[in-house]
Amino acid sequence: MEVFEGPPIGPELVTASLDEVLQAMEAIPADLDWPTLADRIVPAFQRVRPYPPGHPEPLRILVPPGLSVGFAVDIGPAFLNVGAAMIERWGLTPAALLARALDNLDRRMGGVSPDDVVAASIDGQPIRLLQSGTGSASTYVLLPTSLCRIFGSEPHLVIAPMRNLLISLPIDADRELAAWLFDEFAARDPNCLAPAAFVIHAGGLAAEPLGEVFGRA
């Protein structure tokens, strides 16, 4: 096993130690068999920072409304990327893997309530923040009906700068402010996600590229 030292994390962020990650990896079967891992599969959005040279390319598929979604095995203190070779060995199609990952995610979201949402304000703009015990809050947007149960059914704008952070703003919030807010949080996390905003409305989902504001792809 080769360990790559990543960049330092920002203030107030907590991450698992190397020992904790290694212990978690030792607790899962070496052959990564499907029956053992099926309940641990979750969807995952792409991080901005590239993986080390030689790292297997994660499997990614496009889901409505044009979002690139990957998959991971939740081992507790960390996620393990799922590659094409893994699902071939499991005898699964990407569609079947997506269905199981979303089912797992929906079940985990069942333990999250509106009481877990924290209200705050930035320059007079009200915002709401959600961090979950599942480590997957960013991908909650893939299940807008379940997300509306947590944030409410009124239309709102959501950004996900980190894997386990969602920030909700009013639907008419200034998009440049939303992009600035995304950048403020993403800058603290070396594994931050690609800039995007999501409009949640009546159980539906639409995407807006925040990268255009900062000139990022």
Image (tube, grey):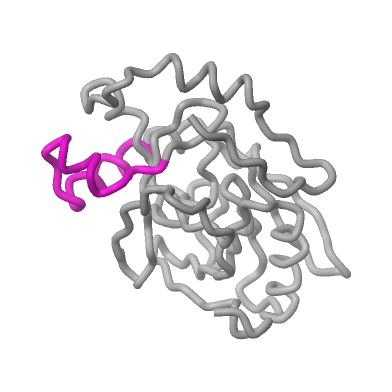
Number of disc labels: 0
Q: Nearer the viewer, residue 99 or 130?
A: 99
Residue 77 point in image, percent of width and height: 57, 28
Residue 49 sits in which quadrant?
bottom right
Q: Is residue 98 magenta?
A: yes
In this rendering, the answer to whether 96 lies above or below 174 is above
Q: Nearer the viewer, residue 89 or 61?
A: 89
Residue 146 lies left or right of residue 82; in this view the side is: right
Seen at 48% across and 36% down, the residue is 79
Residue 107 lies left or right of residue 182; in this view the side is: left
Instruction: Give the main secondary structure of the magenta stretch.
Output: helix
Q: Nearer the viewer, residue 17 or 156?
A: 17
Residue 131 point in image, percent of width and height: 64, 42
Q: Residue furthest right?
A: 123
Seen at 63% across and 26% down, the residue is 18
Residue 130 lies left or right of residue 207; in this view the side is: right
In this rendering, the answer to whether 10 lies above or below 26 is below
In this rendering, the answer to whether 107 lies above or below 137 is above
In this rendering, the answer to whether 72 lies above or below 211 is above
Residue 167 lies left or right of residue 48; in this view the side is: right
Seen at 44% across and 32% down, the residue is 74
Residue 140 point in image, percent of width and height: 47, 50
Q: Quadrant of the C terminus?
A: bottom right
Q: Is residue 63 magenta?
A: no
Seen at 41% across and 67% down, the residue is 205
Residue 201 point in image, percent of width and height: 46, 67
Q: Nearer the viewer, residue 203 or 58?
A: 58
Region in magenta: 81-106
